[in-house]
Image (tube, rainbow, N blue to C red):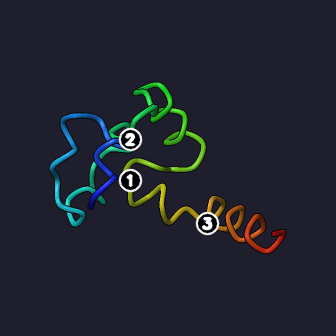
């Protein structure tokens, strides 16, 4: 988990990955509570796991990777 701490809010830096998947998306550095509400309203994203497995985000990542 080295290097992930800088990507998380302080309160979530020590969580094991198995718990971090269920942490609120606002636990990520730079994602505010307001941003989290917008993600929830637009895409049903509530947790870090939801964000990481969202089909639209995955499709966009695939397009970017294939375009390289």
Please name whichever residue, 24 or 28, is drawn nearer the observer in this view of the structure: 28
Relative image position of residue 16 (x, y in whole percent): 17, 60
Q: Give left or right: position of 48 versus 37.
A: left
Relative image position of residue 63 (x, y in whole percent): 78, 68
Pair 2/1: label in front: 2
Point out the residue furthest to the right here.
Answer: 67
Asked where in the image residue 33 lies, by quadrant, the reply is top left
Tell me, yes or no, whether the two marked residues, 2 and 1, touch with CB atoms within 8 Å: yes
Residue at image position (57%, 49%) is: 43
Residue at image position (37%, 51%) is: 47
Q: State the SS at label 2.
A: loop
Q: Which residue is mark 3?
A: 55
Q: Which residue is mark 1?
A: 48
- In the rendered view of the protein, which quadrant contains the C terminus? bottom right
Relative image position of residue 26 (x, y in whole percent): 37, 37
In this view, 27 is above or below 2: above
Q: Earlier in the sequence, mark 2 or mark 3?
A: 2
Instruction: Say which mark, if any, is on residue 28.
Output: 2
Pair 2/3: label in front: 2
Point out the residue furthest to the front here.
Answer: 2
Mark count: 3
Q: Give left or right: position of 45 versus 12.
A: right
Relative image position of residue 17 (x, y in whole percent): 24, 63
The local crowd at label 3, few if under 14, some if 14 to 19, many if 20 or more residues have their Cα within 10 Å, is few
Residue at image position (73%, 70%) is: 65
């Amino acid at each position: 988990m080295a290097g992930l701490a800088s990507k998380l809010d302080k309160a979530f830096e020590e969580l094991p990955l198995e718990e971090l998947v269920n942490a609120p998306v606002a636990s990520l550095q730079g994602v505010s509570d307001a941003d989290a509400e917008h993600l929830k309203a637009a895409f049903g994203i509530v947790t870090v796991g939801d964000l990481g497995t969202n089909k639209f985000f995955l499709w966009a990542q695939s397009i970017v990777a294939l375009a390289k």
